[in-house]
Image (cartoon, rainbow, N blue to C red):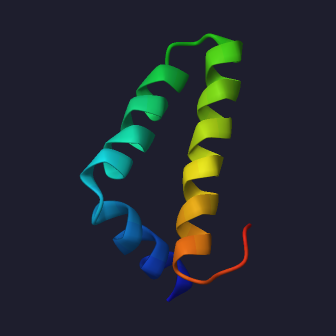
Amino acid sequence: MAQWAVHVHIQRRPDLAAAPRRWEDAAESGDAAQARQAASEIGWILGQAHAAVGLPAR
């Protein structure tokens, strides 16, 4: 249920929902630095979503 709440929170904000997709595309470029940056950014987005719905950060 917690994962669903995080997913819904992200999807309700179009600007936030688009960001993980962009970062995933960047990570697929094959550049290790870009992949690390993408993982960091996606992690931050997930952390913010967890906090917004009252869940501890993962």
Left or right: 25, with 57 as reference point: left
Left or right: 22, with 35 as reference point: left
Residue 42 percent location from the top left of the image: 57, 44
What residue is at 47 percent from the left and 33 percent from the top?
Answer: 24
What residue is at 53 percent from the left and 73 percent from the top?
Answer: 52
Residue 44 percent location from the top left of the image: 63, 49
Query: Does 28 appear above or below 1?
Result: above
Query: Does 56 appear above or below 48?
Result: below
Residue 4 figure quarter: bottom left
Residue 2 figure quarter: bottom right
What residue is at 27 percent from the left and 66 percent from the top?
Answer: 12
The C terminus lies in quadrant: bottom right
**Residue projecting furthest to the bottom:** 1
Q: Which one is in front, 15 or 32?
A: 15
Left or right: 51, with 8 as reference point: right
Residue 51 percent location from the top left of the image: 62, 72
Q: Which one is in front, 39 or 52?
A: 52
Query: Does 14 appear above or below 11?
Result: above
